Image (cartoon, grey):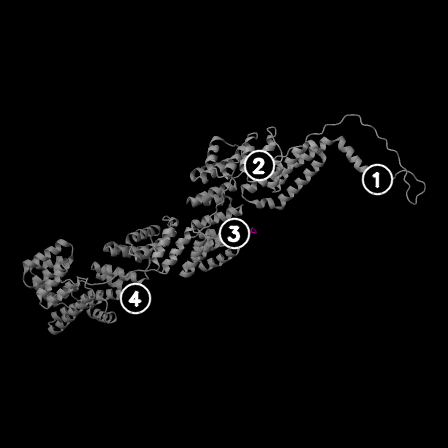
Amino acid sequence: MVQKIYLLVMTGMLLMLRMLVPQQVSAQDFGECQRLVKELLPVFNRSFEENNPALLRTEAYQRGVRSLQAAYAAYHRLAFQPSDSVQRMNNEAVVLALSGNYQKALHIMEELDLGEKDPQLRYNRGLFALLSGKFGAARNDFSASPGGSEATLNTLVTLGKQKKYQEAASFASDNSAKNTGGKWNFNVGMVHKYSGRMEDAVDEITAAIRQKDEMAYRLQRGDIFMRTGNEKRAVKDFEKVARTHPKAQIRYANALLSLNQFGMAKAVFEKYLETDDRTFRGDAYLGMAHSCYGLKQTSEAQRYYKLASTLKRETPALQSGIANTHLSKHEYQTAFTLFDRVIKKDSTYLPAYLGRAVAHYGQKRYDLALKDFKKGEKALNADNKFFADLFVTKAFSEYYLKQGAQAQEDFQTAVKLDPTRYEALAGLSGIMIDQKRYSEAGQFMARALQYEQGYDRMWSNYGNLLLHFDMFKKGYQVFKKAVSLNPANVNAQNGWGVTLLENDQLDKSMALFDSLVREKPELPFLHNNHGIVQAYIGNRHAQKHQVNEANARYDGSFEDFKLAMAAAPGRKFYNVNQGNVYRYMERYEDAKLSYQNYQDKSALNNTAVMYAGQERLKDAKYYLGVAIQIDSLHRVFQYNMTVLVKGKQKEMMRLVASSDENSPFSDIGIKYSRDGFVTIYLYDYEYDVLSFPGRHYMPLPVSEYKEDYFIPEYDFKLVAYEKKKADNSKKKRVRYHSQKVKMPGSRNRSGTKCPVLF
């Protein structure tokens, strides 16, 4: 009972104190509320500037909100009176908004009938409407506000959030908002970006950075640079803020990936993974996988892709990255399945079409490969050297489908991107061969062989090009190399046999062609060249006056040419070689008809030689003259004309016939001539169709960040309650009579005795 009485007394004293100094207590408590709001607003705004709602969930921010709630509750208890209802609703809405309850804050303010006399309250209500996504209502309230920079800024934000970009651009051109820390210029830049005016967007965001170098501004400008192909400038922006913001650190590493700086990117990702931040851990694992892939560490890349897949959903970049590693291992079906899955989920993801095209190519489905290349052609970058392999793959698909013009263009693009890309150089050589541009074909193949010397077909094709220009000495070494790489290459063995013949190793050449004809009797060029070797051996017998042996060889040679023409009747030049044998058999009319069946410069030369042997010098000079008109630099024509004009053919014949292995004549056409003139034989050979296993190094599907947003300015304000007027009227004095309280067990004591307080 005594304690209850004590509490009543103390409460009375507090009420008396409140009546005596109400203004001082109210002012002090409201100032505390304002201070707390001022501390919370920068964090609240930063969560929107950095697009990071997690800032509002931090312990420090939540503790500040609780302090504000307590301070305002204390202030409200001491200072509220019924006339302060509007202020009370505004202040409670501010506290709710700072607590994250935007809808309730707006609902409270919507209950008020605010007029023109309440500009601050209407402005606050506009902020709550902006937070709640009611942009039209927000704009109406901002228009009735005092008209400061913040209201202008937030009006632009409402237009941007409603995607009224044209209206927003017009509003921005007619207004300005100074002292907003760059937010005005940033938001104007975002309007330009959404409207597709990237250069204008960069200019505005650059102006924002000059006012205040914020992370959001740097990231947004970096993102625009990435999308417009200015990766180097993006790297500078991301690097500027990467040390203090994990989000920027990840962006920086991905930008390095886009520049193919895989080692540096890997180091940045590793540095992030060493921190305690887990927000972007999945992105970091994915970036590590891309980095390892770029460094050709395929197994390590697959390990990180697996780690990334445990934290990230199956994004196109992740699935395509995994598929790329399978392409590198030539696991085409697995890669195809993954790329196909990506396309079915997101048909707009172009890198997946390029990957699936390569998978088709690896399975020799060239027509399907070209269809996918067509679908993904906008992703083909003709200025990025890491796309060289894709252009090579596309070009070979076209080449195998006989689309020479398109293939040539794509091979040339690949060579432009990577001058050492031997596959493209060899492909261009093949196209030049098809176009009978043999000199250019030889140049391209010679360049290709500088960078790749382990592919026998490249060597055999180059050797055949040397045969075309009668460069037999050089061809000897080339075919020797081709045969050493692959003894089973028939075209290489064929060329090797021809160069052995031209190197005056007739018996070795004969043995080789005997073997080749037995193994591949269906190949006409082997019979043709076998016949040429027999003809030369016949001439060698004839020079030694071994008539029977010579005739036997001529008969064998004749049969070879017949077999060759039967197998390939379209190769008319076999007639030239057969005509030579007719001439040795002194069947001149048959020889003449054979030469006429293929009336080229070689046939003209041989016709002239035939007439010279018959002492028909006028006819010989005529035909040889025509041959020289066709090719004035041909060394055989010039040699034969010199012999013919000087009439020295018989002396030359005797000189050559009497020469031994150390003869000064290295040309077997001269050495084994029967009449002092050089008779031309036409060798036959076929070019290999080149195919390459494919490096299949794909451009990395670098993660893109589309973090596009407008930045408002939330500057809520609390409104103080009205000040209480002091009541100076004389108050009635109340007398308190003492009361006698009889305590149990006490003797007749009266009055109230308070307990002693310690």
Q: Residue furthest right?
A: 748
Task: Residue 96: give its label.
Answer: none
Residue receiving disc 4:
484
Q: CA distance from mark 2 to mark 4?
A: 82 Å
Residue range in magenta is 271-283
Look at 56% across and 30% down and name the residue there. 144
Mark 1 or 3, closer to the camera:
1
Could you classify mark 4 by the number of other residues whose Cα lies within 10 Å: few (under 14), some (14-19), or many (20 or more)? few
Q: Secondary structure at mark 3?
A: helix
Q: CA distance from mark 4 to mark 1?
A: 117 Å
> Between residues 9 and 209, which one lies in front from this camera angle?
9
Mark 2 or 4 closer to N-term?
A: 2
Which percent across, then down, holds residue 477?
26, 63
Disc 3 marks a residue whose amino acid type is: Lys
Mark 3 or 2, closer to the camera:
2
Look at 37% across and 54% down and name the residue there. 372
Q: CA distance from mark 2 to mark 1?
A: 50 Å
Task: Residue 5: give its label.
Answer: 1
Instruction: Answer with left or right where residue 158 lies relative to residue 412.
Output: right
Disc 2 marks a residue whose amino acid type is: Leu
Q: Secondary structure at mark 4?
A: helix
Instruction: Answer with left or right where residue 489 lies relative to residue 284.
Output: left
Which percent across, then down, holds residue 697?
40, 56
Residue receiving disc 3:
271
Disc 4 marks a residue whose amino acid type is: Ser
Mark 1 or 3 closer to N-term?
A: 1
Instruction: Answer with left or right where residue 371 lies relative to residue 558.
Output: right
